[in-house]
Image (cartoon, rainbow, N blue to C red):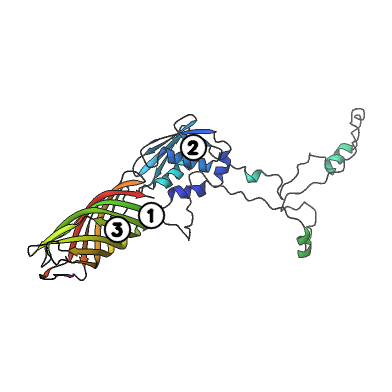
Amino acid sequence: MRRGVAIAMAIALGTASAAARADMPARVAVTGQGGCPTAAAVARALERLHPALRAAVGGDGVRVEVVDGGAGYEVRAAGGVRRLADAERRCSERATAAALAATLLIAPPATPPDEAGDSDGPEATRETPDEPTPEATRETTSPSPPGAAATAPKPVAPVPPRATVPPANTTPANTTPAPAPTPAAAATVPVRAQPEVRTQPTGVVTRRAPATGRALSRIDLELVGLVDGAPALDSAASEVTGGAALRLTLGGRYLAGTLGVAGLAPATATSDAIDVGIVRVPFDLGLRLLLPLGRVEPGIDAGLALAVLRFSAPSLVSATQESRLDVGARIAPFLRVWINQRVGIVAGLQMVVSFAPYTLFVNGAGVIATTPRLWLGGGLGLVARL
């Protein structure tokens, strides 16, 4: 029941929607309270369901109102109310379900005709008027008692009885049952098939079988402001800097892949009284686990981190520049809060552990420091669902 309450209603209305379309008004005015679903999304869903219908937010026409109640929502139209539950707040599916519920409220499907009343079936019989039996004819033509000849009615000629179609599975009295038809004869007798009428009561929800080739259900793009740095551990000097990160998420509702890149401002670390300039450009690739809880969505990233490091010692006369590729593992817990079905706020922390730190060697000064083994950071930004 967690998946597809709105999509499942489309199957229950498969036969009812065609009958309901004929009775739908030409214009519908949609209003809403809350953001999941919005009135505009419900209006678009109504126009997709009824191509001849014109649905607009507000305006003139039959009024349809959608009220967001958090874990559920209501659809009000034509003096009726339908309450639907959706704790996961799938807003696009809510819009489709609201359009279908409004269709049932405005133009409910007609009840199909009773199949038992069909008079063209193979077991139908013709009714014939009552006719005199031979015994009744004999009583009518019997001689009258003496003295009653003047008043006796004239004999009535017997009327041949009409041929009647006997009811099914019955045998007339004093008749010999007809022999059963042979298979060859039965094959030549045309049989009229009765049309099968499938009815489904209003309110019964069926579930569509899941499609085998589903498209991606999640495409998110994050833009986050970062604070990044390294603590002073062993011979590594501390440094702090800031920047921004852009991250793309592709995948399903609970598991997805991530690809991120960040740009950080140059930083200066001091080791043995020597200032070392550090420029760092990190990349990351990994998996994302999510737990959707309505508008709140906690999760965690885990994967591989790569960073291009560039060092320089401008205070030394014989200073040179060196570039290194730092490889490590990244883990980053985060929390997202959705403002609406498309835009939200994301905040998180990250930790990168380098596999093999590098030694910083400067001509004339020897080894002055090593690259940090641990990088820590955090950020706050926006997320958009594409």
Q: Amino acid at mark 3?
A: Val
Q: Which residue is mark 1?
A: 218
Q: What residue do we see at 27% from left, 57% from top?
A: 262
Q: Which residue is mark 2?
A: 105
Front of the two marks 2 and 1? 1
Q: Amino acid at mark 2?
A: Leu
Q: Is residue 274 above or below residue 104?
A: below
Cα–Cα gap, marks 3 and 1: 19 Å
| Labels 2 & 3 near each other (Cβ < 8 A) | no
- Which residue is at the front of the view, 40 or 138? 40
The tag earlier along the polypeptide, 3 or 1, is 1
The label shown at residue 261 is 3
- Which residue is at the front of the view, 196 or 211? 211
Q: Residues within 10 Å of mark 3 (few under 14, many from 20)?
A: some
Q: What residue do we see at 16% from left, 60% from top?
A: 277
Main secondary structure of the magenta stretch: loop
Q: Residue furthest left?
A: 273
Q: Amino acid at mark 1?
A: Arg
The answer to whether residue 180 shows anywhere in this view is no
Q: What residue do we see at 52% from left, 43% from top?
A: 49
Element marked by disc 2: helix
- Which residue is at the front of the view, 244 or 295? 244
The answer to whether residue 278 shows anywhere in this view is yes
The span picked out in magenta is 355-359
Residue 358 on the magenta span: yes
Cα–Cα gap, marks 2 and 1: 33 Å
Q: Residues within 10 Å of mark 1 (few under 14, many from 20)?
A: some
